[in-house]
Amino acid sequence: MPDPKPSFLEYDLRRRLELESYGYRFLRINKFTLLPKKGMYQTPEDVLSALVQQSFGLT
C-alpha cells in the first residue's frame, strides 16, 4: 500500500485540531498505544478498555 499523500495528513491534522477546539475528543490509537504495560494490563483489549475509561473519566 503506498504512503498517504502529505497533503491528506496535513488536512486530517487540521480537521482534528479544529474539531478538538469545539470540544470533541479523540483517542489516538495505534499499535504502540495498545502495547500492554508491564504488570498492569494483560491484553491489548484491556489497554483499550483502560484508555476509554480514562477518556470518559470512568476510573
Image (cartoon, rainbow, N blue to C red):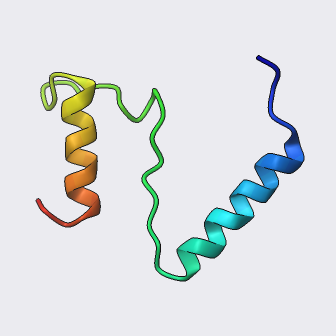
Q: Position of residue 18 (x, y in %)?
A: 65, 74
Position of the N terminus, as image quadrant, is: top right
Position of the C terminus, as image quadrant, is: bottom left
18 shown above or below 50: below
Q: Position of residue 30 (x, y in %)?
A: 48, 34
Residue furthest to the front = 1
22 shown above or below 57: below
20 shown above or below 33: below
The quarter of the displayed image where residue 55 is located? bottom left
- Looking at the rendered structure, the number of numbered marks drawn on it comes to 0
Residue furthest to the top = 1
Residue at the spot 20% in from the left edge and 22% down from the top edge: 43
Q: Is residue 22 left or right of residue 5?
A: left
Q: Position of residue 49 (x, y in %)?
A: 21, 42
Q: Position of residue 54 (x, y in %)?
A: 23, 57
Residue at the spot 23% in from the left edge and 30% down from the top edge: 45
Residue at the spot 73% in from the left edge and 65% down from the top edge: 14
Q: Is residue 26 left or right of residue 58?
A: right
Residue furthest to the bottom = 22
Q: Is residue 1 left or right of residue 55?
A: right
Residue at the spot 80% in from the left edge and 34% down from the top edge: 4
The quarter of the displayed image where residue 13 is located? bottom right
